[in-house]
Image: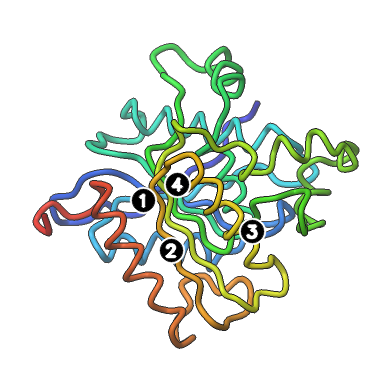
């Protein structure tokens, strides 16, 4: 596995804790700049240390991207990219939200596979929390066909694999807390994706926060000037602070 390039935002000039690893969307075919570059700039401006990962996309297939994110998290926690004190979260949009969700729900087999290939001194584990923005959570129920095909390639018709990589099917009691948001009229990735994952989290007693906004197209990113949905950024910053991520002086 080739390591994915990690671009770090300038560290906040205030005392801070934790780190957010941003995963842009793009249907596993590309990575949207407004869901990476713009997002880490926003986080940095609010005292949150962050960076975005150029994870593998088609023609690379599963599990390359998943393994790259788990490796990047291990490197961040080990101080490979500078000292980090506090929790490490992932924040993903659309297909990047699917990737963030599968990392949040990484199986023991996932962790063992990546650990076996990791550099000495790295400890592979799930992230502490996740922010999932209009995420793909199911590759079976009302699936985003493009994401499924780009991720699985020749195995796109493997129903068992698609189910195993559906975030809502992977949740267990040890899954970390999640913040989810979606718009009710998203025609690309239906709101049922976030609702299904929220239901699974609730069934397993995992803390979560879900925001469903009345209207807004898919792929809004930070959603500037988009009405009510723009409020997700304020809600997410508060939630990250509750997880121990962000400026220390706000405590």
Could you tell me which residue is drawn at 38 percent across and 77 percent down?
231
Disc nearer the start of the sequence (3/1): 1
**Marker disc for residue 50:** 1
Disc nearer the start of the sequence (2/3): 2
Q: Nearer the viewer, residue 206 or 89?
A: 206
**Marker disc for residue 39:** 2
Mark 4 to mark 2: distance in Å?
12 Å
Could you tell me which residue is drawn at 22 percent across and 55 percent down?
12
Mark 3 to mark 4: distance in Å?
18 Å
Disc nearer the start of the sequence (1/4): 1
Which residue, given by chain and number where applicable, does mark 4 sit on?
90
Relative to 168, 52 lies left or right: left
Mark 1 to mark 4: distance in Å?
9 Å
Q: Nearer the viewer, residue 174 or 105?
A: 174
Disc 1 + disc 2, Cβ < 8 Å: yes
Which residue, given by chain and number where applicable, does mark 3 sit on?
193
**Image quadrant for the C terminus?**
bottom left
- Of circles 1 and 4, the one toward us is 4
Could you tell me which residue is drawn at 45 percent across and 46 percent down?
90
Disc nearer the start of the sequence (4/2): 2
Label 3 sits on a secondary structure element that is: helix
Label 1 sits on a secondary structure element that is: strand
């Amino acid at each position: 596995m080739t390591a994915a390039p990690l671009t770090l935002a300038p560290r906040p000039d205030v005392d801070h804790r934790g780190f957010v690893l941003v995963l842009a969307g793009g249907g596993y075919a590309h990575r949207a700049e407004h869901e990476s570059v713009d997002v880490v700039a926003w986080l940095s401006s609010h005292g949150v240390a962050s960076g975005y990962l150029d994870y593998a996309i088609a023609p690379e297939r599963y599990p390359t991207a998943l393994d790259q994110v788990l490796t990047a998290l291990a490197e961040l926690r080990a101080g490979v990219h500078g000292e980090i004190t506090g929790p490490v979260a992932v924040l993903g949009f659309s297909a990047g939200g699917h990737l963030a969700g599968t990392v949040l729900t990484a199986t023991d087999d996932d962790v063992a596979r990546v650990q076996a290939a990791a550099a000495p001194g790295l400890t592979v584990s799930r992230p502490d929390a996740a922010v999932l923005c209009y995420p793909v959570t199911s590759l079976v129920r009302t699936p985003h066909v493009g994401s499924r095909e780009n991720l699985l390639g020749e195995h796109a018709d493997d129903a068992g694999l698609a189910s195993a990589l559906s975030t809502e099917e992977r949740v267990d009691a040890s899954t970390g807390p999640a913040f989810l948001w979606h718009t009710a009229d998203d025609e690309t990735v239906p709101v049922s994706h976030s609702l299904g994952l929220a239901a699974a989290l609730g069934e397993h007693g995992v803390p979560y926060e879900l925001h469903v906004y009345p209207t807004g197209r898919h792929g809004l990113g930070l959603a500037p000037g988009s009405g009510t949905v723009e409020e997700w950024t304020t809600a997410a910053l508060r939630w990250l602070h509750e997880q121990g991520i962000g400026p220390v002086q706000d405590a």
